[in-house]
Amino acid sequence: MATLAFTKGHGTGNDFVVVADPDGELELSDAQIAVLCDRHFGIGADGLLRVVRSAALDEGAEAAASGAEWFMDYRNADGSKAEMCGNGTRVFARYLSDTGLATLDGGLRIGTRAGVKTLTRSERGYEVDLGVYAIEGDETLVRAKGLPVARPGVGVDVGNPHVVVALSSEAELEGLDLTYQPVLDPSPRHGANVEFVVPSDPLVRDGVGAIRLRVFERGVGETLSCGTGVAAAALAVRHWAGVAAPDSWVVDTPGGTLGVRVAEGRVFLSGPASLVFTGEVALA
């Protein structure tokens, strides 16, 4: 039976199996990835990051042409493909830096299914430019176990789809049972991550907004953190707050605190990234 070398990493508790496949020779099925990410029978993770050169993938052709040597092939814990992962980009950059495959000097460009993302070092650890974003005009009704009635949510696209729901209190946030997947009406064609948000009191202090959230990620379930979800939540609350809302935000998740800033129509996410251990696993 073949063995697979891996590294385990996380960003604010959002954890990943990292697999190096520079020349794109490794083919992992959805079922194999699901076993690797299984917390009882595998390594355990919210998803898998395959480290592959952009030029080795058909999906990476555009990234390679733009000068992004590396492509982050991100897969959810169930094996399904995802466009992007904000926390994953930081772990990906940490892996490339620590293994000597790339440097962050002057900014590191990596390819994703949501386009090329640039990472730099920041006082929080790493910052990724998630690019332009879009806030949808139509509301989505969200039903979740623990909420007595459906709540309206706003759609936010930051390279992957999100629906953000505002709650009235910490008690409502704590009372959610996210072992059950929230139901969206209308249901997005490709699904969406769902963020439940409570604003801090006061919402803004010293020019910085503050919120707390929990998130249900499609293809995974509830996670301790979701980088793009954090950005989407900050953007939604900023949208609701109006023209006087700040451009800088701190967002508390169950796994830790991340920073979000908005500049010139783009959104940036900052936070830590850790590599926990390396090993080999039998590949069924």
Image (spheres, helix red, strand yellow):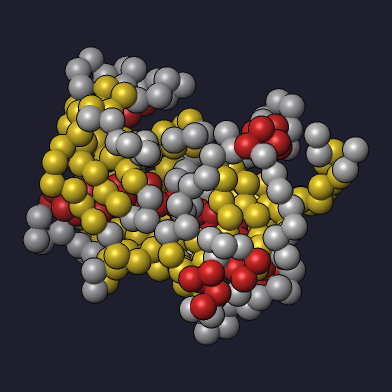
Left or right of 103? Residue 88 is left
Where 265 falls versus 170 (above or below)?
below
Left or right of 92? Residue 2 is right
Given the current orientation, which residue lies at the most extreme right position? 1
Given the current orientation, which residue lies at the most extreme bottom position? 106
Query: Residue at (53%, 61%) from the top-left corner?
Result: 59
Residue 225 x, y percent position in the rendering: 47, 43
Observer-nearest of 60 and 193? 60
Query: Residue at (81%, 39%) from the top-left corner?
Result: 283
Where 279 falls versus 171 (above or below)?
below
Query: Residue at (88%, 43%) from the top-left corner?
Result: 2
Q: Quadrant of the N terminus?
A: top right
Left or right of 152? Residue 147 is right
Observer-nearest of 14 and 79? 79
Residue 175 x, y percent position in the rendering: 35, 21
Given the current orientation, which residue lies at the most extreme top position? 148
Q: Is residue 171 visible?
A: no
Q: Is residue 36 visible?
A: yes
Query: Residue at (51%, 34%) from the top-left corner?
Result: 220
Q: Quadrant of the C terminus?
A: top right
Residue 13 x, y percent position in the rendering: 56, 44
Residue 267 x, y percent position in the rendering: 32, 64
Report the number of discs. Answer: 0
Given the current orientation, which residue lies at the most extreme left position? 243
Left or right of 103? Residue 21 is right
Q: Quadrant of residue 141?
A: top left
